[in-house]
């Protein structure tokens, strides 16, 4: 069932699967639902309002620190993939970070190449503001650990914002959603 906070923010994923013994608060449910929406290529300014401006998104191909770098990462998914299908997800901890296992199938636009990724997602939240401060997406439970790969990930976080525009207003966001 959708919570009022989830509904107000336009969060589409409100049926959150949790491991036995894991119970999410209403706020955690909203945060996890919004993260599931983002990974499904369904970003919006309202969903990103749950993030601190200084938050960081990190996965094996990017380290995006700050709103101007992480927002384009989410909006760019629709440009790269023709289909994003979440095959499964389970929240495994309601702590800080909130942890979740997720399996997603991506289809690359133009070449129809399919890739299934098993992720361990970590969602860190500021205890005072309740906003997201960091999201780590560990493919197969790991992050790269080489200086060379980190350099490429940082380059990606600078390049993507130059190629992907993020709506500036709710009206632009609504119009973008109508096109997709």
Image: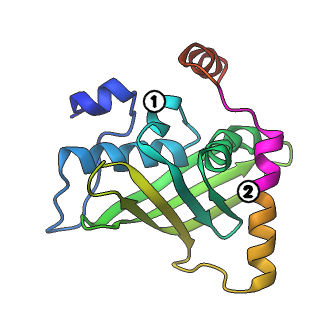
Q: Mark 2 falls on what kind of element?
A: helix
Magenta segment range? 157-167
Q: Please, is residue 31 above or below residue 176 in the view?
A: below
Q: Quadrant of residue 74?
A: top right
Name the residue carrying label 1: 46
Residue 56: x and y, percent?
A: 55, 59
Q: Is residue 53 magenta?
A: no
Q: Position of residue 141 (x, y in %)?
A: 51, 78
Would you place residue 134 above or below residue 76 in this image?
below
Residue 17 drawn at (x, y percent): 28, 55
Residue at image coords 81%, 81%:
148
Nearer to me, 108 or 157: 157
| Coloring basis for residues | rainbow
Can residue 145 be seen in this snapshot? yes
Quadrant containing the C terminus is top right
> Quick check: can you spot residue 109?
no
Marks 1 and 2, how far apart at CA: 22 Å
Dot 2: within a 10 Å radius of its alpha carbon, few (fewer than 14), some, or many (20 or more) residues?
A: many
Q: Please tell me which residue is depicted at 63% across the width and 14% down the height of the picture.
A: 175
Give 108 or 43, whichever is nearer the viewer.
43
Residue occupying image coordinates x 31% and y 39%: 14
Question: How many marks on residues?
Answer: 2
Q: Secondary structure at mark 1?
A: helix
Residue pointed to by mark 2? 157
Please say if the residues under marks 1 and 2 sit with CB atoms less than 8 Å apart.
no
Tell me if 163 is positioned left or right of 135 in this view: right
Task: Identify the image quadrant of residue 9.
Answer: top left
Q: Foreground: 66 or 70? A: 66
Q: Earlier in the sequence, mark 1 or mark 2?
A: 1
Estimate how packed mark 1 is, as few (under 14), some (14 to 19) or many (20 or more) residues with alpha carbons within 10 Å. Answer: some
Residue drawn at x 35%, y 58% is 125
């Amino acid at each position: 069932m959708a919570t009022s906070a989830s509904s107000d923010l336009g969060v589409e994923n409100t049926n959150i699967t949790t491991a036995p013994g894991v119970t999410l608060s209403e706020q955690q449910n909203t945060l996890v639902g919004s993260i599931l929406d983002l990974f499904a290529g369904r970003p919006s300014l309202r969903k990103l309002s749950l993030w601190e401006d200084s938050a960081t998104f990190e996965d094996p191909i990017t380290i995006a620190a700050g709103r101007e770098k992480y927002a384009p990462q989410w909006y760019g998914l629709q440009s790269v993939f023709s289909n994003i299908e979440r095959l499964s997800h389970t929240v495994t901890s309601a702590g800080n970070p909130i942890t979740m296992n997720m399996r997603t199938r991506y289809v690359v636009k133009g070449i129809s190449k399919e890739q299934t990724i098993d992720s361990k997602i970590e969602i860190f939240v500021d205890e005072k503001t309740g906003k997201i401060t960091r999201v780590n997406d560990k493919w197969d439970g790991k992050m790269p650990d080489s200086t060379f790969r980190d350099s490429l990930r940082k380059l990606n976080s600078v390049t993507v914002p130059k190629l992907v525009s993020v709506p500036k207003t709710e009206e632009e966001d609504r119009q973008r959603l109508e096109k997709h």
